[in-house]
């Protein structure tokens, strides 16, 4: 214990004595840890925010969407969900409510919106009246459309605040008309502002009654919709999910053995699949950074080997004064360890600063968040690098013959 | 080492060989040396370059191992010692003074003198006190924080002597202690070593200068790894 303490003291003295060189030596480690912490802090910040966003999507909601395996996508045989599927679910499944179709516009001219000379693009979504309850969005001004609007395919819409801004619609927007694709739509409601996520506006959308949306997109076409619904009893969610699966398989005429051509997802699953992506990004960046730490470690080994040669005479003197092999080994090992740990400490500090800076500079970006595990992992890795790459130079120093070392010029 | 052995010679060399093999050539740097050195002796080991005096110095200082024979240091068989025990012997029994001082260049005088005590596990405050005392004894009480490159040769050798003596070693082993010093500083350093001898320190000195050897009470002359002469003399230096 005493020897360890003394070794730490002498290691820090030595590092301090060679301040500039020590800084250069651990620069690789500093940069490596800085990038880990910066990347992790930003990604984790994102993940925090996104989880909070998904929480808005009720825990008891189910989303059904078509699913085409990649192989069939290449063949151009795309699976679809149709109105009839929704009707079947509505008719045959108990314990659900607020079922709504969600129709996203296909890419192309339908996304174009204009008001007087202003042209802009927006996400145009056709929905049923219960969409609001499922997704917890509400109008801040005006009204939402009714079943009647839907049934009569009235050209009315509820828009996000950005649409009003982009189209520069003056005064009270309620009752104003603007073009969606080739049709004129009347604004009946403005939806509550949701702010930005990753710098992208969440308020640039046009909500149309489902029937109207179909009319605009061409009713004759075989459209692919998503279906959202709420499960009345949360505890029966899995059961409901399974029944929907059976009904849809039957409706789609799938034989046993054929895979589902649709997916039934809970809000939780959406979050999970998102988190999978986040974790993958984290793991990949951590891996890249691991390599840079390895390179940093090799740099440290290199400098330590030079340092051992340079200090051969000093090692000889210490041995003449009674230092054992272990004393020398420990001294050099701890010097390498201290270099990497100091590098790690600086890296964590700089990385956190960098992450916070990026988060602060990009508008709408979530605050950086450094989880404890990232800090611990960085330090652990630094320590491991210090020991692994310190051991060779330290052993070399310890094995020096005192007479030769004393004679070394 | 028992208290009863206190009168035994501090160094006993019995038929000691140190052999170097260079290719097929075998060189006996020490060629059957027998030697006893008693406590409180003041010994000079002299000889031409290549006579084996440096090897003798390294063997006595536990820096090197003998090839054949027996070496008892304070009654303990050095040949049987492990690497760690040799380090311990260097730390406790031997104090080295080198021709080129061999101070730690990055450390202050005080830290240089403190260093041997690190390996004895003495706490820092105590080390500091002992080292400051030792530097005071060699007349450097006001240069504690000076680094070697801020000091003269004579001052550096004083630091080295203080460092050699800090652990109360059985033997002070000096290798050409005045070799790098001018004559005036040499005589100052020799006066200091003489004084240590008078205080009871056992001193073994390797030198090739006759007037330095003249300070000693016993002169051992080595030629080709053998003891050629071993004479006691009256100290002539003042």
Image (tube, rainbow, N blue to C red):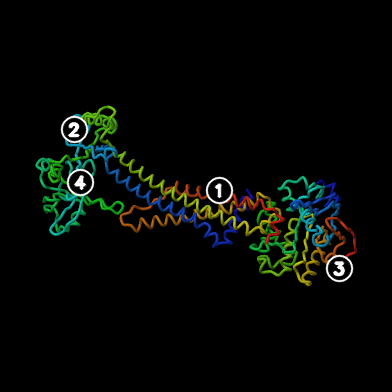
Quadrant position of the C terminus of chain B in the picture: bottom right
The residue mark sitting in front, 1 or 2, is 1
Residue at mark 2 to residue at mark 4: CA–CA distance = 26 Å
The location of residue B108, given as percent across then percent down, is 65, 63
The residue mark sitting in front, 1 or 4, is 4
Do circles 2 and 4 both sit on a common chain? yes
Judge left or right: residue B62 versus residue B104: right
The residue mark sitting in front, 2 or 4, is 4
Can you see residue B203? Answer: no
Please tell me which of labels 2 and 4 falls first in the chain.
2
Which residue lies under the disc numbered 4?
Answer: A106
Which residue lies under the disc numbered 3?
Answer: B237
Which residue lies under the disc numbered 2?
Answer: A90
Residue at mark 1 to residue at mark 2: CA–CA distance = 64 Å
**Tag 1 and tag 4, C-beta contact below 8 Å:** no
The location of residue A280, given as percent across then percent down, is 38, 45
Report crowding for label 3: few under 14, some 14 to 19, many 20 or more residues within 10 A (C-alpha): some
Residue that protrudes farthest toward the front in the picture: B24
Q: Which chain carries label 3?
A: B
Please tell me which of labels 1 and 2 falls first in the chain.
2
Residue at mark 1 to residue at mark 4: CA–CA distance = 56 Å
Secondary structure under tag 3 reads loop
The location of residue B232, given as percent across then percent down, is 90, 60
- Relative to the observer, which residue lies in front, B107 or B166? B107
Report crowding for label 4: few under 14, some 14 to 19, many 20 or more residues within 10 A (C-alpha): some
Do circles 1 and 2 both sit on a common chain? yes
The location of residue B228, given as percent across then percent down, is 88, 58
Label placed on residue A388: 1
């Amino acid at each position: 214990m005493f020897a360890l303490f003394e070794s730490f003291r002498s290691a820090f003295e030595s590092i301090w004595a060679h301040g500039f060189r020590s800084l250069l030596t651990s620069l690789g480690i500093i940069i490596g840890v800085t990038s880990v912490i910066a990347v992790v802090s930003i990604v984790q910040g994102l993940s925090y925010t996104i989880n909070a966003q998904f929480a808005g999507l009720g825990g008891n909601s189910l989303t059904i969407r078509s699913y085409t395996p990649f192989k069939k996508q290449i063949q151009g045989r795309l699976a679809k969900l149709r109105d009839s599927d929704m009707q079947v679910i509505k008719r045959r499944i108990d314990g659900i409510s607020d079922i709504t179709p969600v129709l996203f516009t296909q890419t192309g001219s339908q996304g174009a919106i204009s008001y007087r000379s202003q042209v802009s693009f927006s996400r145009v979504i056709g929905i049923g009246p219960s969409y609001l309850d499922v997704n917890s969005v509400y109008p801040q001004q005006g009204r939402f459309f009714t079943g009647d609007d839907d049934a009569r395919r009235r050209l009315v819409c509820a828009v996000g605040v950005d649409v009003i801004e982009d189209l520069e619609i003056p005064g009270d927007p309620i009752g104003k008309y603007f073009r969606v694709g080739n049709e004129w739509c009347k604004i009946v409601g403005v939806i509550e502002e949701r702010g930005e996520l990753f710098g992208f506006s969440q308020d640039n959308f046009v909500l149309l009654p489902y029937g109207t949306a179909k009319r605009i997109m061409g009713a004759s076409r075989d459209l692919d919709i998503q279906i959202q619904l709420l499960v009345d009893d949360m505890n029966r969610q899995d059961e409901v999910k399974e029944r929907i699966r059976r009904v849809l398989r039957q409706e789609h005429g799938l034989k046993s053995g054929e895979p589902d051509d649709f997916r039934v997802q809970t809000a939780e699953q959406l979050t999970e699949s998102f988190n999978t992506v986040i974790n993958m990004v984290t793991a990949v960046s951590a891996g890249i950074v691991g390599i840079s730490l390895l390179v940093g470690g090799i740099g440290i080994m290199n400098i330590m080997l030079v340092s051992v040669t340079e200090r051969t005479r000093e090692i000889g003197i210490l041995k003449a004064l009674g230092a054992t092999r272990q004393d020398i080994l420990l001294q050099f090992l701890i010097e390498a360890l201290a270099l990497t740990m100091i590098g790690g400490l600086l890296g964590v500090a700089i990385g956190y600063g960098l992450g916070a800076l990026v988060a602060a500079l990009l508008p709408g970006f979530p605050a950086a968040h450094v989880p404890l595990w990232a800090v611990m992992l960085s330090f652990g890795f630094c320590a491991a690098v210090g020991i692994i790459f310190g051991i060779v130079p330290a052993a070399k120093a310890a094995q020096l013959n005192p007479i030769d070392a004393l004679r070394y010029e | 080492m028992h208290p009863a052995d206190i009168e035994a010679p501090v160094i006993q060399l019995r038929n000691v060989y140190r052999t170097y093999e260079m290719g097929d050539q075998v060189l006996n740097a020490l060629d059957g040396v027998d030697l006893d050195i008693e406590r409180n002796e003041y010994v000079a080991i002299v000889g031409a370059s290549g006579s084996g005096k440096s090897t003798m110095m390294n063997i006595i200082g536990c820096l090197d191992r003998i090839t054949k024979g027996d070496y008892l240091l304070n009654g303990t068989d050095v040949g049987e010692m492990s690497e760690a025990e040799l380090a311990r012997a260097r730390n406790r029994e031997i104090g080295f003074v080198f021709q080129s001082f061999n101070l730690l260049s990055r450390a202050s005088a005080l830290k240089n003198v403190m260093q041997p005590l690190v390996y004895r596990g003495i706490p820092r405050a105590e080390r500091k006190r002992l080292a400051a005392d030792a530097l005071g004894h060699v007349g450097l009480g006001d240069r504690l924080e000076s680094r070697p490159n801020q000091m003269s040769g004579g001052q550096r050798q004083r630091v080295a002597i203080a460092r050699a003596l800090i652990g109360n070693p059985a033997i002070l082993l000096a290798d050409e202690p005045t070799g790098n010093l001018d004559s005036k500083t040499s005589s100052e350093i020799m006066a200091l070593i003489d004084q240590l001898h008078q205080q009871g320190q056992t001193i073994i000195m390797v030198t090739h200068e006759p007037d330095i050897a003249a300070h000693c009470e016993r002169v051992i002359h080595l030629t080709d790894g053998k003891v050629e002469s071993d004479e006691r003399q009256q100290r002539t230096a003042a």
